[in-house]
DNA sequence: ATACTCATGTAAGCTGTTACATGATTCT
DNA sequence: AGAATCATGTAACAGCTTACATGAGTAT
């Protein structure tokens, strides 16, 4: 299994697909691309870049812009190798979710119908906001970056699905209909 | 905003919908229900139960079973109130995801087609496994626990969607077809 | 007898966020 | 002149997992 930290995977991957970058570049890239499925804060990015340099996976070039310091990192052969090992390793990938709206929903039986609908509405709005964030980040990926586009489409599809699910539930709750209506639809869909 | 910790929300909610429980009960409930969207380990559950007791949100009853210690926790009025406040508060709920397979996919352009397909396959298998876990936990929720059923259906639908998405992508990659085929389908779906 | 489940907890350590600190450059 | 952006970092803290430790009851 790969001994790269989560942040290291992100950094090596970013530098691999985007070319030599500064910590600040990567911070911005994360904000518009991986944020919703692999977050990283500056407090992690900068120290991890240093660590990867001292481990020989990255090299650093000082390229100040005027009097402003600037460290541009590139992958070494060892770094590229570590990246490829991680990408092709067969241990199961991390998948974690923290979904507070869904947790509220799980405990929502004793709420009033209005309060229940409000929980679902908040959940929908949240995923609509994420959807907007993804749409804004229209991937500049050409034919050489097919997978940037694929990952982007995945985000649209996934959060779009959730938004539709919420809308359906909001309707069912508002019309006092038991969400058995969901049963047929989703059971078939989820098979 | 609620000052309850993430684990506190889970514990109060569980005790609210399931009635008085031990830490061990809750640990098992988490394993079969919230695990995939709100995890909690024993190392968090036991200390947090104590904390909630000393904060007056839970009461503890010692009910040893033979020589085996057993602490059964119930919600106090204050605890129920804190739960209701959390459920109805309007600050945006936590939503976080960590999806390593998707991160790999984002960086997969330089892999061979076989390696690319393997990444997607691993992703699919992972969500199929989660789907199995959810299905096994068939919710015993009656008409008084409608939302247990709703949350369960959400899990089936969501992970089912991902599995279908992976299958489609696997096919497209295997057939050398550019996943433009996805474009029409998902763009419409995601609207 | 042995293994599994019930039951409770602690300690070490890793990961990650938030907030802060600093200062230069560029845009309005 | 002032605000926003570029650019790098640190320190304190919160959250969570893993591994360990302990022991009683129950099923095979």
Image (cartoon, coloured by chain):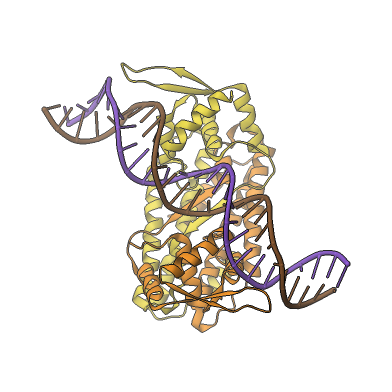
Chain colours: A yellow, B orange, C purple, D brown
Using the rendered view, name the quadrant where residue B64 is placed.
bottom right
Q: Where is residue B92 shown, x and y percent of the image?
A: 36, 58
Q: Where is residue A22 shown, x and y percent of the image?
A: 43, 26
Q: Where is residue A35 shown, x and y percent of the image?
A: 44, 44
Left or right position of A104 against A2: left
Left or right position of A155 against B118: left
Quarter containing the N terminus of chain B: bottom left
Q: Is A51 located above or below residue B62 in the figure?
A: above
Q: Nearer the viewer, residue B44 or B155?
A: B44
Left or right position of C19 against A99: left
Q: Where is residue A136 shown, x and y percent of the image?
A: 37, 44
Using the rendered view, name the quadrant where residue B137 is placed.
bottom right
Q: Is D5 located above or below residue C13 in the figure?
A: above
Res A139 seen here: no
Quarter containing the C terminus of chain B: bottom left
Q: Is A154 located above or below residue A172 in the figure?
A: above
**Which residue is drawn at the image coordinates 55% and 31% (left, top)?**
A12
**Which residue is drawn at the image coordinates 64% and 52% (left, top)?**
B124
Left or right position of A1 against A66: right
Using the rendered view, name the quadrant where residue B75 is placed.
bottom left
């Amino acid at each position: 299994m790969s001994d790269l930290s989560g942040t290291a995977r992100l950094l090596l991957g970013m530098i691999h697909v985007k070319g030599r970058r500064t910590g600040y570049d990567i911070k911005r890239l994360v904000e518009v691309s991986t944020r919703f499925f692999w977050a990283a804060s500056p407090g992690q990015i900068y120290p991890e870049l240093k660590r990867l340099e001292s481990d020989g996976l990255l090299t650093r070039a000082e390229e100040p812009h005027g009097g402003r310091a600037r460290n541009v990192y590139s992958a070494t052969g060892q770094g590229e190798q570590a990246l490829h090992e991680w990408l092709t390793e067969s241990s199961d990938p991390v998948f974690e979710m923290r979904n507070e709206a869904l947790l509220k929903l799980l405990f929502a039986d004793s709420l009033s119908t209005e309060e229940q609908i409000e929980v679902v509405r908040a959940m929908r709005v949240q995923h609509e906001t994420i959807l907007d964030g993804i749409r804004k980040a229209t991937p500049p990926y050409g034919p050489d970056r097919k997978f940037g586009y694929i990952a982007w489409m995945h985000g649209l599809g996934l959060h779009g699905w959730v938004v539709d699910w919420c809308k359906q539930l909001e309707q069912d709750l508002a019309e006092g209909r038991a969400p058995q209506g969901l049963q047929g639809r989703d059971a078939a869909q989820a098979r």
